[in-house]
Image: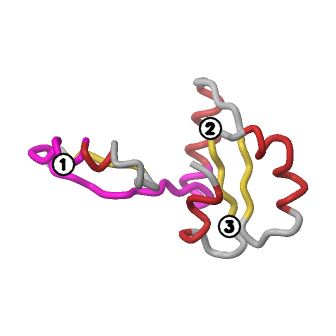
Amino acid sequence: MSLQKTKHLLKAGITLVTAVPSVSLYLFGSVLNRFRSKKSIGMLVRSSGEHLHVLKTMAASGKLEASIEEVFPLNQVRQAHTTSESGRVVGKVVMSVD
């Protein structure tokens, strides 16, 4: 997910955090963020209890919010897969088992 693809979804003052940062984000992100109202940062993530605790704390305080593209009932798994593979998805495609 890049800032270019998602900036129309962000409010001014919001920072996009991605675990799949581009090379340009690493090289120029901190410089460009000084001039943007919508910022982006990249981070490399590995699974650990400490990292999950940080993410849980951020989510509980409202500092972390997942972007959900669409929620599908389980009986529409084919449509969910088609949507996911379309190349136009900005958030997560979620399957509901209710």
The part of the chain drawn in magenta is 58-81
Element assignment for label 2:
loop
Q: Which residue is mark 1?
A: 79
In the image, is residue 94 above or below residue 52? below
Callout in the foreground (3, 2): 2
Is 62 included in the stretch rendered in magenta? yes
Measuring from the top left, give residue 83's x and y in whole percent: 29, 50
Element assignment for label 3:
loop
Residue 10 relative to residue 91: left or right: right
* Nearer to us in this view, 35 or 88: 88
Amino acid type of the residue that numbered disc 1 sits on in the rendered structure: Gln
Q: Which residue is mark 3?
A: 14
* Classed neighbour count for the residue bearing mark 3: other residues with Cα under 10 Å, few (<14), some (14–19), many (≥20): few
Amino acid type of the residue that numbered disc 3 sits on in the rendered structure: Ile
Q: CA distance from mark 1 to mark 2?
A: 25 Å
Q: CA distance from mark 3 to mark 2?
A: 18 Å
Q: Residue furthest left?
A: 75
Residue 20: which numbered mark, if any?
2
Q: Earlier in the sequence, mark 1 or mark 2?
A: 2
Measuring from the top left, give residue 36's x and y in whole percent: 80, 69
Q: Residue at x 62, y 37 (%)?
A: 20
Q: Residue at x 34, y 42 (%)?
A: 85
Measuring from the top left, give residue 37's x and y in whole percent: 76, 72
Q: Earlier in the sequence, mark 3 or mark 1?
A: 3
